[in-house]
Amino acid sequence: MTIDIIDLTDPQYADLSPVQLAMVRAAQAKKDSILAKAASECRELLYILLQNDNARSSVREQETARIEAQADADVTLVREDLLYQLAYEAIGSEGNENGPYRYPENPNYYLTYSQRFLVVRNYYMQATSDATARLEAYRMDTLARTYLGEFYQTLYDLLASYVS
């Protein structure tokens, strides 16, 4: 897979954590899917216009431009979301006098609630691959209730969605 959703040098790419690498690959897959869909729509438009003897029509140029503009906008959203996720994934590298911030040993109360949500979510997603055990552990976590505030229920719903 060629990664071109964001520009990274080799050293920057090597410094990404496994979670960040997964985020980059998922975003690249979304980008590739968006561009493939746009190309397919442009081909379908051409075939329709050829069937109706209108292949040289200005409609083709206008519709192709519209499809490509929408694809570019969608790719930009995916790229911005990836950059946002990568920025907040790196939060755990900071610390205070008690050591590096790490949930639940040394939670960072300077984070916004949405950033705390990401930290706690990552903690539980990495803790175990058993979705039921993960949900039960989260349900028993009293620190998470106060640390996440109103985001507690959101994360509970997310973790519950993995239980089937």
Image (cartoon, rainbow, N blue to C red):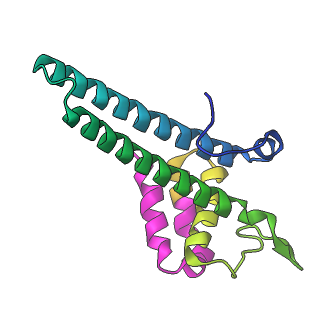
Q: Residue at x 58, y 42 (%)?
A: 5
| Location of residue 42 (image quadrant) | top left
The secondary structure that dominates the magenta segment is helix
Q: Is residue 8 left or right of residue 156?
A: right
Q: Quadrant of the C terminus?
A: top left
Q: Residue at x 20, y 23 (%)?
A: 55
| Location of residue 1 (image quadrant) | top right
Residue 154, placed above or below residue 4: below
Specify whether residue 141 is in view.
no
Region rendered in magenta: 136-164
Specify whether residue 56 is in view.
yes
Q: Is 159 colored magenta in this rendering?
A: yes
Residue 97, placed above or below residue 164: below
Q: Is residue 42 left or right of residue 6?
A: left
User: Which of 84/38 is in front?
Assistant: 38
Q: Position of residue 147 (x, y in %)?
A: 60, 79
User: Which of 125/42 is in front?
Assistant: 42
User: Which of 134/63 is in front?
Assistant: 63
Q: Position of residue 67 (x, y in %)?
A: 32, 40
Q: Is residue 158 left or right of residue 63?
A: right
Q: Residue at x 49, y 51 (%)?
A: 76
User: Which of 116/159 is in front?
Assistant: 116
Name of the residue lying farthest toward the left: 52
Residue 64, placed above or below residue 163: above
Q: Position of residue 112 (x, y in %)?
A: 60, 78
Q: Residue at x 13, y 17 (%)?
A: 51
Q: Position of residue 12 (x, y in %)?
A: 79, 47
